[in-house]
Image (spheres, rainbow, N blue to C red):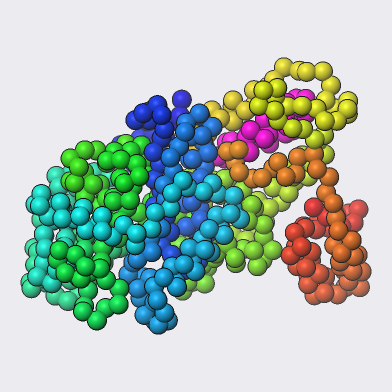
Amino acid sequence: MLKLFNTLSKKIEDFNPLTSEQVGLYTCGPTVYDFMHIGNLRTFLFSDTLYRVLSANGYKVKFIQNITDIDDKIIKKAKEENIPLSEITNKYTKFYFEDLKKLNITPADVYPKATEHVGKMAKYIEKLVEKGLAYVEEDGSVYFDISKFEDYGKLSGVEGRTLKTGTRILSRAARELRSSDEYNKDNIQDFALWKAVEADEKVGYDSPWGRGRPGWHIECSVMSQEYLGDTFDIHAGGVDLIFPHHENEIAQSEGYTGKKFVNFFLHGEHILVNGAKMSKSLKNFYTLKDLEKKGSDPMAYRYLVLTAHYRDKLNFTWESLQAASNALNKLREEIRGWPNVILNANKGSQDLDSSPLWGPSAQNDNYYQRFLDVLNNDLNTPQALAVLHEMISSNSPISNKAKSLLEMDKVLGLKLDEYLGKKLEIPERVKKLVEEREDARKQGNFEKSDELRKKIIELGFEIKDTPKGPKIT
C-alpha cells in the first residue's frame, strides 16, 4: 500500500486515488527566464520519482506540468535586454527540456503554457468577482479577498485576516507588495488575480477590467483544473511554494468550484550548498551546466538526489557529488561483468550467456518487493538504494539479480540498462590520452595531467588512479 506525507494533514496517509482509471498528478513547472538551478532540478527529480513509484504500483498516471511564460521576472528581463518576451521564454524552455532529458526525467503528458490560457484565466476571475470572493480596484487590478475564504491557511498554517483594501489608502510600496506574486508569511495579504498595466506597457491582454495580465497564482488553478478536473489526486512542488502559491491556489480554486481542490499536496525540501542557502550573491548558485563543466555526469546528480529523502534538506558539496559519482560508477562496473540478459514480458529474463554463473534456478530473494515496500513508505529512496546495493552484493543467481535490477531502475531512472552485461569499449583516442596523462604524472607535470584528465572526462570516461595503474570507467 502506497503511503505519502500529505502537507494538508501534516501526516503520512494511505494513498487512495479518486478513481480506478487513473491518477491525476500536477507539478508546478519552471518560470522560464533563466537556467534552472540544481534546487529547482531536485524538485523535478522528486516529482519524477513520485510518478515512477505510482507507475510501479500499477497506476496509470496523467501527469501535467505547467510552463510559466509570463511573470514579473520574465517581463523585467525582457525590458532589460530590450527583446520580445517570447525570445526569452522560448530560449529557456528549450534549455529546461534539455536538462530534463539529461537527468532522465519522465516527460509530462501535457506542458500547458500560461500565455495560452489567459482568456480562460480572465473568465475564471470574473466568476470569483461575481461570487464576491474578489474585488476590482480603480486601476483595473483584481484581488482575491482572503477574508472571504474561511479555510485560508489550512495548508501553510498562516491565519488569514481582513485587510484594508483600496489602492487610494495604500502607499506605493504597499501597493507594489500587494501586487507581488512572491511574499512571505509576514505579509499575509489579499493577492493579485489580475494586474492592470500602463497603456504603453508592451505585455498585456484585454479583459473586462481593462488591459492587464494574470497574477502568478491563478495560472496553476486554471491549468490544473482544465486538464485534471475540479478535484484531482496529487499536487507536487517545492516547500517554497506552500505559501503563498499553493495556499492561494486552494483559496481561489475551492472558492471557484465549491469543491475540494486536491487530495494530496506533496512538497520537496530545499537544497543547500556547503550548508548555506543557494544564492548568486554567495557565488554558490549552480546549474546543471555548471556541474557538467566540472566533468560531472548528470546521472551522478540524479544519484545524489536519491541518497536523501525528498522531505529532508540535501547539502550539496562538490565532494558529495564526487562520492555519488564514485558510487554510481562502481555500480555500473559491477553490472558490466554480468552476462547479458533480456526481459520478455511473458517469459521473464532469458539467459543469453552459457556462463556457469547462472547455475540452477534458486529461490528468489524478493529484493524487488522489499525495494518497492520502502518506496511505498513515502518514497524512501535512500533505503531503496540500500536494498539495490544489498541485492547486487548478494549470492542470488545473476539472472534473478539482473531482472530485479532492471525493474528497480524503472523507478530509480539511472539508465542501468545501458551498462548491464556490456563490456566497456574504450576508443583508441581515450587510451592515448590516458597514456599521455600517465607520462605527465611520472614526470611530475600535474598541471598537464589535470588538463588531460578533463579531456578524458569530456569524452565521457572517468579515470581512477590505482596501485596497479590508471583504471578507465
User: Which secondary structure class fits the magenta region best?
Assistant: helix
Q: Residue 67: x percent and y percent? A: 41, 58
| Quarter occupied by residue 135 | bottom left
Q: Nearer the viewer, residue 110 or 379?
A: 110
Q: Residue 374: x percent and y percent? A: 54, 31
Q: Is residue 55 something one can see in this rendering?
A: yes
Q: How many numbered discs, if any?
A: 0
> Is-magenta flag for residue 389?
yes
Q: Nearer the viewer, residue 403 or 118?
A: 118
The residue at 51%/60% (across/down) is 96
> Is-magenta flag for residue 398?
yes
The residue at 85%/27% (across/down) is 357
Q: Is residue 432 left or right of residue 113?
A: right
Q: Residue 449: x percent and y percent? A: 82, 70
Q: Is residue 204 left or right of residue 37?
A: left
Q: Which residue range is magenta in the image?
A: 380-409
Q: Nearer the viewer, residue 61 or 303?
A: 61
The image shows residue 97, relative to residue 153, as above or below, that is: below
Q: Is residue 239 left or right of residue 422?
A: left
